[in-house]
Image (spheres, rainbow, N blue to C red):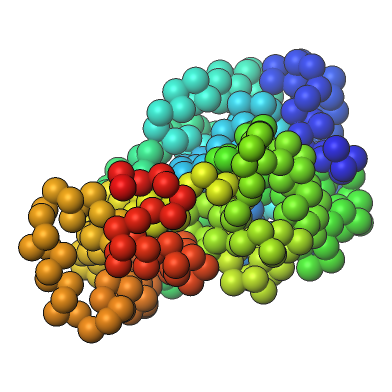
């Protein structure tokens, strides 16, 4: 424990999942404070001064977003909670949603008050039926107690909340794709600008916010921006809640102040499993590059990890030990992106399929089933054959794709190729898996 894990400490309070338990834990103190003694502009100023940044991957300053919403000419405004958490190793938003639904709902109300919105939509990933039912029940309880409706806490603030099912696909984590699916269309990302704060849900200004970001807002308003700025790095204050999974002794959800070395996160999660050695991590899940063991002192922060050529994104830390084959991991990541591509952009739709094929040709199973003819085809490609195709293909997909899925589809693959070139060469040239994981 670092002593600064205020979000997970809050989740550990007995009974905090219920409305009474949440109130006993100090819940709705921030909303009461905002409605009784602060103006919307003062709430916006406090969020801006706190330095809070989005936790969904963009790391965009929340204060700028809420201020842009407040300046919109259209009075019909929405706050949308992005609960479309997906992708390999991502599960910390689910823990927050289940652990303290009223905390997230209070965050939505505060964001709505600050931004001048009257409508809130909680989009919860398809498949998380229990969480969705719990949220519907929670919204009903808040309505009964005057915490949602036309005159909240008797202060004249009107806000309605509803709960919707998300599409349950990875690309709908992108905010404009999320809005498309919320409006009943296929979850294809929109061309930006205009950004959702200008034209979002049904054409109205919309603040789309990640679950963890919203969870921070009640604490900031209740305890103050100075308290929040006292935690973590000055440029990215606060904590980060991380889903830690993979080859680690205690997979789970952990919270650390920003700037904490990644090595400390691995220690909190119990370190390597018996008899194994951790070789690398994907600190931001499938959209990030591999961070090798020599760089585990890198800080948990977006800017800090970017200096190491990777990113934190939404904090899905996937751990890999010496028992895994990075060629096989790269192949599985390519298959994941091929499956999750929404198909709108040709470079992403076709390129991710080609990535998977190339990696299958390198790693063997496809070659084994397709016979030597397939392998012979590579003789047309100048040495080092398949490797020569991967990086230009990733570059093309990245440059020509409309959304973050396509732009990040090859990041982990190319970083694996750069970090473990001998493993890729051994698979293709000698048909050997140095870690003795693959079929060979
Ligand atoms: S980059 Fe891929 S996921 Fe994104 S819009 Fe294009 S096809 Fe769809």
Residue under the image location 12 percent in, 71 percent down: 377
Question: Does residue 47 sit above or below 145 in this rendering?
Answer: below
Question: Does residue 343 sit above or below 417 in this rendering?
Answer: above
Farthest residue to the bottom: give it: 382
Relative to the observer, which residue lies in front, 393 or 69? 393
Residue 169 visible to an observer of this rendering: yes
Residue under the image location 63 percent in, 49 percent down: 278
Relative to the observer, which residue lies in front, 18 or 276? 276
Residue 258 visible to an observer of this rendering: no
Question: Residue 403 location in percent, x, y?
Answer: 39, 65
Relative to the observer, which residue lies in front, 264 or 362? 362
Q: What is the quadrant of residue 361 in the picture? A: bottom left
Q: Is residue 316 left or right of residue 4?
A: left
Question: Residue 235 location in percent, x, y?
Answer: 79, 68
Question: Residue 38 location in percent, x, y?
Answer: 84, 49
Residue under the image location 79 percent in, 17 percent down: 14
Screen quadrant of the N terminus: top right
Q: Is residue 45 left or right of residue 351?
A: right
Question: Residue 258 location in percent, x, y?
Answer: 78, 56
Q: What is the quadrant of residue 326 in the picture? A: bottom left
Relative to the observer, which residue lies in front, 181 or 307? 307
Residue under the image location 63 percent in, 18 percent down: 141
Farthest residue to the left: give it: 373
């Amino acid at each position: 424990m670092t002593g600064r894990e205020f979000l997970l400490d809050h989740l550990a309070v007995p009974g905090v999942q219920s409305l009474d338990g949440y109130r006993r834990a100090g819940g709705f103190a921030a909303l009461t404070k905002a409605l009784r003694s602060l103006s919307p502009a003062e709430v916006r100023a406090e969020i801006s001064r706190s330095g809070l940044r989005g936790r969904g991957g963009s790391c965009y300053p929340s204060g700028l977003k809420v201020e842009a919403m407040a300046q919109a000419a259209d009075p019909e405004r929405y706050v949308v909670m992005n609960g479309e958490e997906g992708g390999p190793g991502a599960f910390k938003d689910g823990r927050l949603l289940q652990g303290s639904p009223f905390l997230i709902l209070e965050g939505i109300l505060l964001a709505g008050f600050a931004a001048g919105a009257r409508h809130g939509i909680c989009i919860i990933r398809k498949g998380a039926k229990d969480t969705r039912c719990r949220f519907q029940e929670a919204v009903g309880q808040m309505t009964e107690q005057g915490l949602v409706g036309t005159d909240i806490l008797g202060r004249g603030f009107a806000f309605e909340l509803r709960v919707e099912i998300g599409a349950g696909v990875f690309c709908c984590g992108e905010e404009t794709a999320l809005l498309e699916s919320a409006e009943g269309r296929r979850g294809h990302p929109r061309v930006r600008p205009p950004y959702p704060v200008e034209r979002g849900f049904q054409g109205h200004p919309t603040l789309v916010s990640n679950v963890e970001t919203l969870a921070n807002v009640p604490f900031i308003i209740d305890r103050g921006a100075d308290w929040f700025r006292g935690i973590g790095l000055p440029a990215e204050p606060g904590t980060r809640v991380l889903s830690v999974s993979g080859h680690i002794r205690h997979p789970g959800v952990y919270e650390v102040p920003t700037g904490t070395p990644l090595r400390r996160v691995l220690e909190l999660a119990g370190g390597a499993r018996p008899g194994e050695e951790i070789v690398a991590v994907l600190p931001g899940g499938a959209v990030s590059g591999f961070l090798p063991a020599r760089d585990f002192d890198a800080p948990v922060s977006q800017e800090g990890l970017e200096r190491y050529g990777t990113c934190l994104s939404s904090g899905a830390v996937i751990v890999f030990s010496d028992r895994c084959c990075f060629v096989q991991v790269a192949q599985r990541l390519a298959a994941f992106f091929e499956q999750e591509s929404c198909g709108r952009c040709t470079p992403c739709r076709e390129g991710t399929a080609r990535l998977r094929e190339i990696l299958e040709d390198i790693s063997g199973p496809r070659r084994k089933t397709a016979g030597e003819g397939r392998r012979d085809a590579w003789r047309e490609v100048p040495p080092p054959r398949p490797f020569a195709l991967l990086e230009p293909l990733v570059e093309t997909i990245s440059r020509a794709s409309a959304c973050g899925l396509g732009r990040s589809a090859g990041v982990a693959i190319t970083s694996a190729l750069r970090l473990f070139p001998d493993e890729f060469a051994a698979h293709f040239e000698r048909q050997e898996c140095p870690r003795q994981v693959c079929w060979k």
